[in-house]
Image: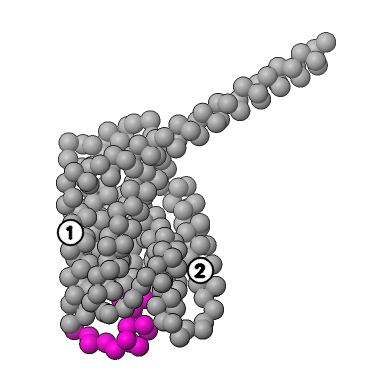
Amino acid sequence: MTPLISTESTAEGHASSAPARKTSRLSGVRMILTIAGKDLRSELRSKDTINASLSFAVVILLLFSFAFDMSPQQVHEMGGGLLWLVFMFAGALILNRSFSRELPNDCLDALLSSPATGAQLWAGKAIANYVLVLAVEAACLPVFSVFYNVSLLAQVPKLAVVMLLGTWALTIIGTVFSAMTVNLRLRELMLPTLLYPMLIPALLAAIQCTGAILNPDSTADNTIWYRLLVAYDVIFTLLASALVEVLLVG
């Protein structure tokens, strides 16, 4: 009878552990959404970062429109690079505040002492940054359309795909580097210095895809660039979630 009892107890153990794992996963997702919601509510109350980022992006687009009197063909060829440079610079302003807003009143220490793991804290802040950067990018598109006399209505679905992939690449890396530089006095300088070189593959892919979308005469096959963006997002999401615990606790 001993083997029978052992088998039954093992089966009961497996059966009881399955709901526990499911509950743990749901608790982790809830923790991530709580952190993301906290950051979004904090930004919506103050609007300091998103206003500064949006104003910076609009000013850069305006200055470029006056500095370079581009023909429609030149806009089609260079528009992708121009848009993503503006997105990168404006996004860095949002990312820089991701962890530094937690410094007053030792809020960062309280977050690290909470039940949330380092990966959950990173994921929550990355999602909040993702939403904020996408909001700034979406506001920049009509400004770009007016200043450069480009119709984007027909290209919006394709542009949205590239923006979703490229912006996630920006936010996953930027959120990690924001955590690394939060205690540095020159974090406003160090974050872009670390961030932009790491983004070169994703930035090149996003520029190529956006340029092909803006250029109606383009016949290039950009499948490889879309694959590069997806691979970059997947690889660096896994790396960031695995290493961020060491960065935050260390």
The residue pinned by badge 1 equals 52
Q: Which residue is depicted at the point 51% across and 56% down?
A: 234
Q: Quadrant of the N terminus?
A: top right
Q: Which residue is depicted at the point 49% across and 51% down?
A: 238
Q: Secondary structure at mark 1?
A: helix
The 10 Å Cα crowd at callout 1, few under 14, some 14 to 19, many 20 or more, is few
**Is the image coloured rainbow, by chain, by secondary structure, or in one colour?**
one colour
Residue 226, numbered label: 2
Which segment is the magenta one? 67-82
- Report the front residue among 225 and 103: 225
- Does residue 2 show up? yes
Image coordinates for residue 250, horizontal then vertical, percent: 35, 43
The reply, left or right, for residue 239 in relation to residue 47 is right
Residue 39, numbered label: none
The reply, left or right, for residue 80 in relation to residue 239 is left
Q: Secondary structure at mark 2?
A: helix
